[in-house]
Image: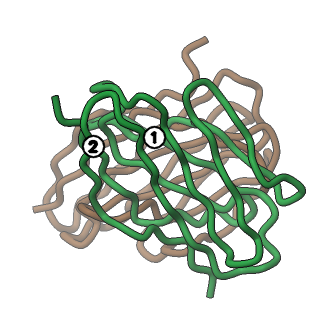
Amino acid sequence: NAGVTQTPKFQVLKTGQSMTLQCAQDMNHNSMYWYRQDPGMGLRLIYYSASEGTTDKGEVPNGYNVSRLNKREFSLRLESAAPSQTSVYFCASSEAGGGDTQYFGPGTRLTVL
Amino acid sequence: GENVGLHLPTLSVQEGDNSIINCAYSNSASDYFIWYKQESGKGPQFIIDIRSNMDKRQGQRVTVLLNKTVKHLSLQIAATQPGDSAVYFCARGQNFVFGPGTRLSVLP
C-alpha cells in the first residue's frame, strides 16, 4: 500500500503559467481533499470531494479548479499561477466524509515567481 | 466562524519529560477531534482521535483529554523522545478545520 501519492514533489512556475497537481490513493477511500499550507500556518482546505463525481469548495478555492477523475484520483489545477499561490500543497483521503481520519500525501512544494 | 487553535506556537521539553500540547475550540457542536503530527518536509500523520462522548483516550505513549465544559483538549506525550520533535495540530473532524500547530522541540 502506497497510501496517498502526489506528483510532482517540487515545481517552479512563472506568473501566469498553468499546471496540474496530481493525487492518487490506493486505500479505496471515498473522500479526497486538497489543502495548502503556508509558513507558520495550519492547513487550509481548498477543495474536497466527498465521493466520486462530487466536488465542493473549501475555505480558499479562488484560483483553483479540481477534478475527481475516478475514485482513486483527485487533481488540482492552477489555471494562471500567481505568487500568492506559492505554498506547500497536500492531498488527503478518508474513508468517509466529515468526522473521519484523513491520510495525507507527502506534499508538493510550489513556487510561483 | 469555526476556530480551532493552539495555546502556544512552540514548546521545548527535555528528553524523557512529559509534554502537554493544548488546543481550544469554539464550536460546542464539535464531536470529533483528531491530533496530527507533522515532521519537517512531510505530510501530517494521524496520532489519536477522540469523540465527544469520551473524556480521555490513550494510545501508545499518548493521551488525549477532552474538557467539553471549557472547550479544551490536550495531547500528552509521555517520556518525550527526540523522534517526537514535530509540529502538532489539533483538528475538528467534521469540517476539516486545522489550528496553526505547536512546534515541539525535544532537548537532549
Residue at mark 1: chain: B
- Label 1, secondary structure: give it: strand
Q: Is A23 or A99 nearer to us in this picture?
A: A99
Query: What residue is at 48 percent from the left and 37 percent from the top?
Result: B77
Residue at mark 2: chain: B
The answer to which of marks 2 and 1 sits earlier in the sequence is: 2
- Label 2, secondary structure: give it: strand
The C terminus of chain B - image quarter: top left
Q: Residue A47's x, y, as percent? A: 59, 62
Of all residues shown, which one is farthest toward the front?
Answer: B17
Q: Residue B48's x, y, as percent? A: 64, 39
Query: What residue is at 74 percent from the left and 41 percent from the top?
Result: B57
Q: Residue A63's x, y, as percent? A: 41, 72
Tag 2: residue type?
A: Val
Q: Which mark is residue B37?
A: 1
Query: What residue is at 48 percent from the left and 56 percent from the top?
Result: A35
What hue represents chain A?
brown
Does B61 appear above or below B55?
above
Residue to which mark 2 is pinned: B13
- The lab-note entry on whether marks 2 and 1 share a chain reads yes
Tag 1: residue type?
A: Lys
